[in-house]
Image: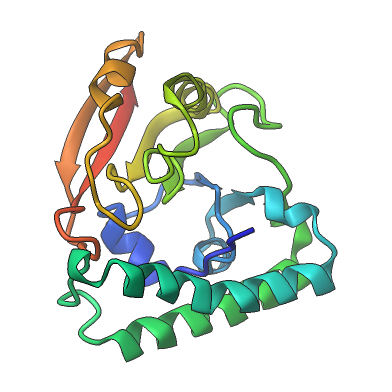
Amino acid sequence: MLVTSRSYAEYEAMFDLTELPASVLDCSAGGSSFTAEAAARGVDVVAVDPAYELTMPELVDTVRRSLPVGNDIVEEHEDKFVWHWYGAPERRDEMRLEAADRFLQDIGEAPDRYVAGRLPELPFEDGRFELALCSHLLFTWADTFDRDWHLAALRELIRVTSGEVRVFPLVLQGTGEPVAFLPEVLDELAGVRWEIRKVPYEFQAGADEMLVITHS
């Protein structure tokens, strides 16, 4: 299990966030510090991830072991990544370590903010959140999860959200290749508007766009 620790600053850039609404879902959140930092800003924020089924010692171990695994993926596809946002690999490592520490502290102090669950079935009522964020799951792992799973997952995120769903990135992990079934999935979404929007973040070369879905 890979439980990645991304920072609030990375979320701001990946999702082009300027101001957060009152309620936000982070799915699947992994070991990111976004929930801790958004909560500190007064936001009603919930993180959901299957990793939260683990005991605390297991989760700590998994988060710590995931840090070098993410670097292995980058090294394997070194020519597919750019460093202008981070500046240097060392800065990315520093941000991830800080995010992991903040996440582990917060889940220990406020476990109710962290819910064990997985797409395409979430344990929330319709319209529970104004904004749902999905980082590095949908489309990133399109070689593992098929077209039908993606369609069901998007519909579930739409169901639990009253405002917007934002998904980043829209390419395969590692290679950065486009996802062949993305247009088909978007064509099947009913009752919503969608757009693909540029964001001020790029790590995988060419992965600088997010999907924004808005209720009609």
**Place of residue 178 in the rendered image (x, y in percent of width and height, measured from the top left):** 22, 39
Q: At 59% across and 66% down in the image, what residue appears?
A: 31
> What colour scheme has been applied to the protein in the rendered image?
rainbow
Specify the quadrant that holds the N terminus: bottom right
Examine the rendering and report whether any part of residue 7 can be seen: no
Left or right: residue 158 compared with residue 84: right
Examine the rendering and report whether any part of residue 124 can be seen: yes
Left or right: residue 114 compared with residue 20: right
Q: At 43% across and 74% down in the image, what residue appears?
A: 72
Figure quadrant of residue 177: top left
Left or right: residue 61 compared with residue 75: right
Judge whether 131 appears above or below 37 on screen. above
Question: 127 and 186: which one is in front?
Answer: 186
Q: At 20% across and 64% down in the image, what residue appears?
A: 80
**Place of residue 153 in the rendered image (x, y in percent of width and height, measured from the top left):** 51, 27
**Place of residue 87 in the rendered image (x, y in percent of width and height, measured from the top left):** 20, 84
Judge whether 95 appears above or below 74 on screen. below
Question: 99 and 169: which one is in front?
Answer: 169
